[in-house]
Amino acid sequence: MAAPVAQGTTVPATVRPGLDPWLVHMIAAPAVFALLVILPVQHPPYPVRCGLGLLIWMAWWWLKRPVHIAVTGLLPLVAISIVGALPMSQILPAYSDELVILLVGANILTTTWDRWALDRRLALVTIASVGTSPRRQITIWFLVSVAFATLLPRVVVAATLIPIVVAMLRFVGIEDLWESWPGTALVLAISFGSSLGGFLTPLGGAPNLLAMEFVQNMVTHHEFLFTTWITHLLPLAAASIGAVLIYANFAFTFEESALPGTRSYFVKELESLGPMGRQERWALGLFIAAVVLAFGRISFKTLVPGFTPAFAFLSCALLTFVIRPKGEKLLEWEYAQKKMMWGLFYVFAGGSALGLVLNKTGTAEYIARGIVPYASHGFVLTITIFALITIIVAQIMSNVASMAIMVPIAIGVAQTLHLNAMPLVYVVIAASHCGFMLPSSSGSAAVAAGYGINLRQMLIKGAWAALICLVVIVISAYLAATFWPGFLTA
């Protein structure tokens, strides 16, 4: 029999009974969801309470990880089928979205890199060219992402660039991105850059074209020119990009001033690989072909309207199982299924499904309209309120949905208050591209999360980045409206 503990003796913390943190997170998150669902109140409405509950549940589990983040991505299917807030036919498309297909195609293509060590070569070329300084790497990848996102949807940019960064990190011994500051920082740099680059030009994605349509139909009743978009949004875009780039370089503290290894070591390693083999050239060529097809879609869009970037990537990916340089297939399915990041697809789909739930249940609009009445007390306060609302909405749903909700609200409020709607529209467009915090914020954030970066850091660093953008957008819009009369027009 164990000896009794003497009176006054402190029991060691290691043997004190207590609740298992894993069990707390497993029970508390769905309990909050259930409580919101069963509350016997009329306001907020039942669908909105379901949406809020699902948002809390998924965000909680994504941050605390009592289960794998891919498992959390499947929650909308179970939760909505039980509470019936929406028909399941409205949720299921998120799990077969074209962007999921794009991710599958990109993942197969980069798995081919792994098969023939092309990822090793690309990693060595990148490090040897850019250098081993994490801060320099952050700057380069951020700016490259911004540049690509001016022409491509952000998810295409993220799906193209993040695998290259992950290959580079694995080469220097960084496998677990969740525990790696440099790994999380570099992937977030791409996520932030691709999000912000998306509103430099109207070609940055469907939400931009949607905003243009709202302006044409509800405000100007004439064509919203591409040149107008670029010139009028440039002050807000340039200020936001510059501010977040500076922040990204100081947001992460690194124990070492460089990635493991020296530049001369990586150069020697690259030289030791010798010339690129035929299999490597095919693997790289197929990936480049997919990117070119995605970029050049405008040239053949009328000829093959259904051949979107998603199917361009998938087509090139399927060729890896067919092409046989030197009599050997580029990729075998048995090899691919072991190497592919299956969880990536479910995290992305789960984020999209959450956005659909928040949009279709009216949850996002409920949050937005609750704050709108405060937007009638002067120009600065009005643009601040709309920037704040839009950024909040952008953290929980895609920028397409954010734009679809917030642009009509901004125009309607401006017309009701007899204000010029265009400054509000420009502010909303800019703020809707600042979704950084959660996998449901944007396609690029979902891709980043799927590769296993630290979601707590995504939340914290993304919140600061969003706050910085809020301040910068408001100041830039105020200065543009004050000193540039053309900013008030479309």
Image: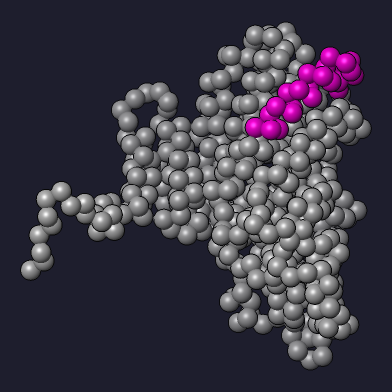
Q: Position of residue 305 (x, y in %)?
A: 80, 53
Residue furthest out toward the left:
1
Query: Is residue 440 covered in magenta?
Result: no
Whether residue 249 is visible here, answered yes or no, is: yes
- Left or right: 392, with 44 as reference point: right
Coloring applied to the structure: one colour
Provide the major secondary structure of the magenta segment.
helix
Report the span colored magenta. Answer: 467-490
Of 421 and 482, the residue lying toward us: 482
The part of the image, by quadrant, that contains residue 133 is bottom right
The part of the image, by quadrant, that contains residue 397 is top right
Which quadrant of the figure contains the N terminus? bottom left
280 over 432 or under it: above or below: below
The part of the image, by quadrant, that contains residue 5 is bottom left
Whether residue 312 is visible here, answered yes or no, is: no
- Left or right: 341, with 168 as reference point: left
- Left or right: 481, with 113 as reference point: right
Q: Position of residue 392 (x, y in %)?
A: 59, 32
- Left or right: 341, with 140 as reference point: left
Please name the residue shown 50% across and 35% down the image. Answer: 361
Query: Is residue 488 covered in magenta?
Result: yes
Please name the residue shown 24% across and 59% down the image. Answer: 15
Of 127 and 340, the residue lying toward us: 127
Please name the residue shown 80% across and 78% down the image. Answer: 269
Q: Position of residue 129 (x, y in %)?
A: 86, 64
Of 43 and 440, the residue lying toward us: 440
200 over 301 or under it: above or below: above
Please name the residue shown 80% across and 32% down the image. Answer: 239
Which quadrant of the figure contains the C terminus? top right
Tally of marks: 0
